[in-house]
Image: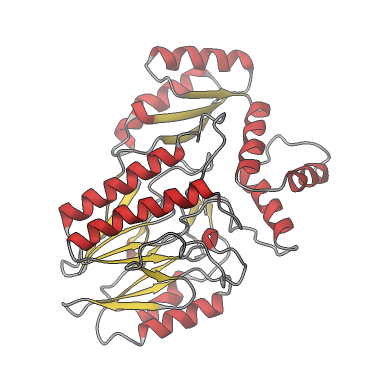
């Protein structure tokens, strides 16, 4: 079975004044057209969107909803041309209610797309290999039940595609998830040569010994996202070749990275080594945020990096960075009062507070005090 999958599109219609995301719908649709081109070229048997097509928890703008519909229609048309099955799963951002009973992904989509929004689904290819597809659920016990339900349908190999909290997967460099199921809990349902492919986390990751891979987002949905060694785009797996998953880099996304420096030479050293360190990194598409200890260092960094041709720069001090974090949290749907209440709890001190903190605080307010710590930033 030849499988092409992508995840965490996070469609968002952002205010035009925000330079870091004002053109978001444009490059998201360009990426969907690129997916369609790749489907026609590679002719997979199955294409799967692993979820989080929407960005703002609990709501979606008409512009984002229409863009999502257009993007998935482009992908579906390509799938129809090559006779590929196309599945769209629900992630936690796609669910309008906590129990997942109401979601956004079944809106404005062609009828031939197979939706996986509540229970498990499965597919068996002509070669006998199977897929088990499990949408997001807030209940780890129910999630494992759904994995078992799908696993019992296969008489041979089954690869699992999930959108779920899994411990030790990284939200970002140095930030492992501390909630969710264990990778080992999934091993009893897969064969020794099958894989678990996971959405939900934005940074592509490979845990070869566990045969577990994170598809990752083809974009950098927030400043919490950073450049890692694996490219962002789509994941390709040929189950008959028994090889590892491979990632293809998206040529249309702006690339975001945040760098904290003590002096201007730290920023220059990072830029010099970045292209060699990160496969497929195109510095012309890099949106680099550099956090400097003083305005003097910030001015030097700005001048030296511009001299090297980096024009998409956001050079800040810690206090200015904090203003951006708050702005982003508000754009992403956190109620303004929740942000104010959270800052007030800290005695009015906001330096060091991340977008993740603000999103957590806002979602606790939105969902009636339910603690969602560890499920927000990077999801």
Q: Is residue 58 left or right of residue 81?
A: right
- Is residue 3 at least partly visible in the picture? yes
x%, y% of residue 118? 49, 75
- Among the 4 quarters of the image, the one containing residue 250: top left
Instruction: Specify the quadrant of the image occupied by residue 89.
Output: bottom left
Instruction: Kindly identify the residue that appears in the image at 39 percent across and 64 percent down.
Output: 88
Towards the viewer: 122 or 196: 122
368 relative to 127, above or below: above
Placement of the N terminus among the 4 image quadrants: bottom left
Q: In the image, residue 353 lies at what x, y percent?
A: 68, 41
x 26%, y 87%: residue: 155
Total marks placed: 0
Rendering coords of residue 66 (x, y %): 45, 50
Residue 354 seen:
no
The front one of 174 and 65 is: 65
Please provide percent x and percent y for residue 113.
34, 66
State the residue in front, 194 or 99. 99
Q: Which residue is located at x 47 percent, y 18 percent? A: 265
């Amino acid at each position: 079975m030849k499988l092409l999958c992508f995840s965490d599109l996070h469609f968002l219609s952002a205010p035009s004044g925000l330079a870091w995301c004002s053109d978001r719908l444009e490059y998201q649709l360009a990426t969907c057209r690129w997916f369609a081109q790749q489907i026609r070229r590679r002719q997979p048997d199955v294409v799967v969107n692993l979820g989080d097509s929407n960005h703002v928890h609990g709501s979606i703008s008409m512009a984002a909803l229409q863009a999502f519909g257009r993007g998935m229609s482009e992908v579906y048309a390509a799938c129809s041309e090559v006779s590929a099955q196309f599945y769209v799963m629900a992630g936690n951002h796609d669910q309008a209610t906590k129990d997942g009973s109401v979601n956004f992904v079944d809106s404005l989509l062609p009828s031939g797309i197979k939706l996986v929004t509540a229970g498990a689904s499965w597919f068996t290819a002509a070669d006998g290999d199977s897929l088990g597809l499990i949408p997001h659920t807030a209940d780890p016990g129910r999630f494992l039940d759904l994995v078992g339900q799908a696993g019992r349908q296969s008489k041979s190999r089954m690869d699992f595609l999930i959108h779920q909290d899994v411990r030790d997967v990284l939200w970002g460099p140095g930030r492992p998830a501390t909630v969710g199921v264990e990778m080992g809990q999934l091993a009893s349902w897969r064969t020794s040569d099958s894989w678990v492919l996971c959405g939900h986390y934005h940074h592509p990751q490979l845990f070869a010994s566990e045969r577990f891979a994170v598809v990752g987002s083809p974009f950098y949905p927030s400043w919490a996202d950073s450049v890692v060694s694996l490219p962002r785009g789509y994941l390709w797996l040929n189950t008959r070749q028994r090889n590892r998953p491979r990632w293809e880099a998206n040529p249309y996304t702006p690339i975001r990275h945040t760098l904290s420096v003590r002096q201007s030479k730290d920023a220059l050293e990072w830029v010099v080594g970045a292209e060699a360190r990160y496969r497929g990194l195109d510095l012309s598409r890099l949106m680099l945020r550099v956090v400097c200890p003083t305005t003097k260092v910030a001015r030097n960094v700005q001048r030296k990096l511009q001299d090297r041709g980096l024009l998409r720069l956001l050079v800040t001090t810690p206090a200015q960075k904090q203003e951006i974090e708050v702005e982003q949290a508000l754009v992403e749907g956190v109620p303004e009062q929740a942000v104010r209440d959270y800052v007030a709890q800290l005695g009015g001190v906001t330096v060091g507070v991340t977008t993740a903190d603000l999103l957590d605080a806002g979602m606790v307010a939105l969902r009636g005090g339910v603690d969602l710590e560890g499920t927000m930033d990077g999801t």
